[in-house]
Image (tube, grey):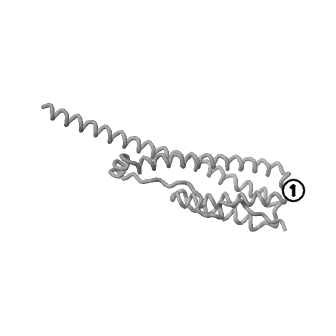
């Protein structure tokens, strides 16, 4: 009788342990989704600011068609991802950020544009949004790291494997060109 009770107690402990790990994996996976949603909110905010910025800049920057087209193409690339494939979306967003950086750097050559209150307000809003995007990406990567540690480290990897939990993708810049500051030539 006592060996049976010990066996039942051991089984109960194992079941509770599995449930605990499973629930923590679910909680971390949901945190990853929520963190990505926060990144997505800020990316959408930037996406919505771009047409206003472009309209303001077009009147002043008649000789910078290539820069304006690069921003337009990058924005279209982001829209083309549709939010479905996260790595593709991350890459498209990084390209858009780089194109916007070049646009703002080129705008320095236009004193009338720099003096425009509309442009200054949009530039400040875009800068603020870029900072929020940066913080949201950082938080996303921190949550992904916690989730991936739980999925890949013992004993969580056993439970993760049993219930098909897989490691998430970090938000990272893969293109070396996107890591560099934009180069502007006013000659």
Q: Which residue is drawn at 55% across and 59% down?
A: 82
**Which residue is nearer to you in this view: 127 or 182?**
182
Task: Please indicate whether residue 68 sits to the left or right of residue 79 in the image.
Answer: right
The percent coordinates of residue 70 (x first, y second) are 70, 65
- The part of the image, by quadrant, that contains residue 13 is top left
Looking at the rendered image, the quarter that the C terminus falls into is bottom right
* Lateral position of residue 72 relative to residue 112, left or right: left
Q: Which residue is drawn at 79% across and 49% down?
A: 120
Tell which of 79 and 156 is nearer to you.
Answer: 156
Q: Residue 181's spot in the image, x, y percent?
A: 71, 59
Hey, which residue is sitting farthest left in the picture? 1
Task: Give the residue number, with chain letter if any, for mark 1.
Answer: 111
Dot 1, how many residues are within 10 Å of its Cα: few (below 14), some (14-19), or many (20+)? few
Q: Is mark 1 on a helix, strand or loop?
A: helix
Q: Is residue 30 above or below residue 174?
A: above
Q: In the shown orientation, is residue 56 left or right of residue 16?
A: right
For this rendering, which residue is in front, 32 or 4? 4
Query: In the image, residue 86 lies at what x, y percent?
Result: 52, 57
User: Which quadrant of the view contains residue 79?
Assistant: bottom right
Q: Residue 76: x and y, percent? A: 63, 62
Q: In this view, does 173 lie above or below 144?
A: below
- Is residue 87 toward the left or the right of residue 42 in the image? left
Identify the residue shown where x is 79% and y is 52%.
119
């Amino acid at each position: 009788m006592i060996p049976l009770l010990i066996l039942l107690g051991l089984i109960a402990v194992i079941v509770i342990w599995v449930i605990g790990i499973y629930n923590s994996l679910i909680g971390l996976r949901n945190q990853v989704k929520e963190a990505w949603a926060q990144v997505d909110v800020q990316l959408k905010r930037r996406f919505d600011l771009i047409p206003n910025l472009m309209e303001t800049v077009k009147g002043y920057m008649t000789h910078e068609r290539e820069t304006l087209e690069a921003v337009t193409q990058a924005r279209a690339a982001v829209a083309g991802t549709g939010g479905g494939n996260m790595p593709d979306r991350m890459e498209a967003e990084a390209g858009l950020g780089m194109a916007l950086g070049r646009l703002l750097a080129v705008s320095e050559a236009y004193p009338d544009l720099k003096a425009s209150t509309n442009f200054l307000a949009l530039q400040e809003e875009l800068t603020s949004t870029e900072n929020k995007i940066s913080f949201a990406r950082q938080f996303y990567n921190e949550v992904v790291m916690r989730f991936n540690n739980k999925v890949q480290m013992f004993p969580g990897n056993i439970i993760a494997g049993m219930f098909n939990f897989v490691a998430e993708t970090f938000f990272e810049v893969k293109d070396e060109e996107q890591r560099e500051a934009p180069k502007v030539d006013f000659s």
